Amino acid sequence: MTKSEELFQRAVKRIPGGVNSPVRAYGSVTEAPRFIQGAVGCKIFDVDGNEYIDYIDSWGPMILGHNNEQIKEAVIRASENGLSFGCATEKEVEMAEFICERIPHVEMIRMVNSGTEAVMSALRVARGYTGKSKIIKFAGCYHGHTDAMLVSAGSGVMTSGVPDSAGVPKGCTQDTMIAVYNDLNSVEQLLVESKDQVAAVIVEPVGANMGVVPPKEGFLQGLRDLCDKHGALLIFDEVITGFRLSFAGAAGYFGITPDLVTYGKIIGAGMPVGAYGGRKEIMEMVAPAGPVYQAGTLSGNPIAMAAGLVQLKILWDDQDIYKRLHQKGELLFDGIRNIFREKNVPYQVNSVSSLGCIFFAKEPVTDYASAKASDTKAFSDYFQYMLNHGVHMAPSQFEAMFLSDAHTETDIQETLQLLQQYFA
Ligand code: KE4
């Protein structure tokens, strides 16, 4: 028995499913998940001494690679003053100024502890600001596990095959309406049907929780126009795309201005940080400045701020990093497309810059329904082959592969060679 298997046997006795987040359980791909000992750069090591090229990257935060020296140093230095005070600190001001001075559509920002909290809070602010209660989300998009968003959600919910969650009363989701990703008509229909009672349309500007589904040409601009026409706010959930596609996230990459954005993952550099921000007139609705209540004991934690701020400063100062990430994405995902062409593999490869995935589907994947048509057994076989040959990927067809600045051309070529063998 491996140490991972032994740890998993112990874990399931005391932790639901043996994990602290469902996607880690490998439930849809194999029996026992690998327990991780440590990581550096783009490599991750499990408790049995196996080394992997890592494409989970902690689900996105480790954009510079694991165990970055400057970030580690900042955490150690900050921890020397104490771990948490429950009071305001200078680092929180620095973090807010650093982001707001560089992302035009973020005039004010509030730190929280996860992407879920960021989304939950942004939805409340949107409702408080507009006085409306309806929310439109898209089937297959995942916005964390706040009740109102657990409807036709992606990520672990989609992986589990259960489109919604038990324990969420009708009252929590009766104002949540579901549109079809990349289908502007489905959005307009809901806006008209609700007689403009929609507070916000929330969207992953690149779908990355049903596998990776890029926005079709004109889709995001169309959402912007529809929100303006029908008096709804446009919320970009940039928990994955924020600070990844560009420093200003997908908003900067596609040139679309949302009214509110949510952040997570990269903003905390691996520490528990989420944030939501946007126009001053909207954000000034948030307590104690305004009547929309939101709070958090560890929000803006000084250690987490130190880590996140160093990562954001590195991303901002190194103007070539986004070009490098884009090039790594092209090398990997165009490389897979070439293999599929050469070998007549009928599957799909979707990608946007350093985000992408293989869909074991014969038709193009542009939304939840076409993603659901994927052959998850074929994905599971592929996942296990790659894992057993030293490549660590998201254990679900409905997740993304994340590239970091630490992935080298050699690592990517090694991955492509494995794929060449697998699809031989
Ligand atoms: P967290 O609460 O997990 O920090 O963020 C929720 C969230 C919100 N919005 C988007 C677009 C997200 O992708 C997420 C979380 N992403 C998943 C991975 N698909 C987190 C991994 C997990 O659930 O363990």
Image (cartoon, grey):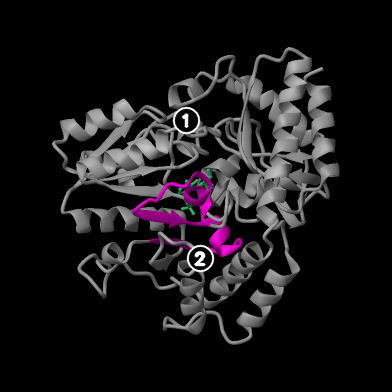
Q: Residue drawn at (78%, 16%), measured in percent from left and top?
A: 342
SS label for mark 1:
loop
Q: Amino acid at mark 2?
A: Arg
* Residue 48 rendering spot, x and y as whole percentages: 80, 48
Q: Residue drawn at (63%, 71%), measured in percent from left and top?
A: 310
Residue 169 seen by the camera: no
User: Mark on residue 216?
Assistant: 1
* Residue 393 rendering spot, x and y as whole percentages: 68, 39
| Depth check, front residue: 10 or 270 | 270
Q: Residue drawn at (37%, 27%), measured in percent from left and top?
A: 183
* Image vertical order of residue 246 relative to residue 306, above or below: above
**Is residue 395 found left or right of 234 in the rendered image?**
right
User: Mark on residue 102?
Assistant: 2
| Depth check, front residue: 286 or 170 | 286
Magenta part of the chain:
248-277
Q: Is residue 106 magenta?
A: no
**Is residue 104 found left or right of 350 in the rendered image?**
left
Q: CA distance from mark 2 to mark 1?
A: 27 Å
* Residue 154 rendering spot, x and y as whole percentages: 45, 36
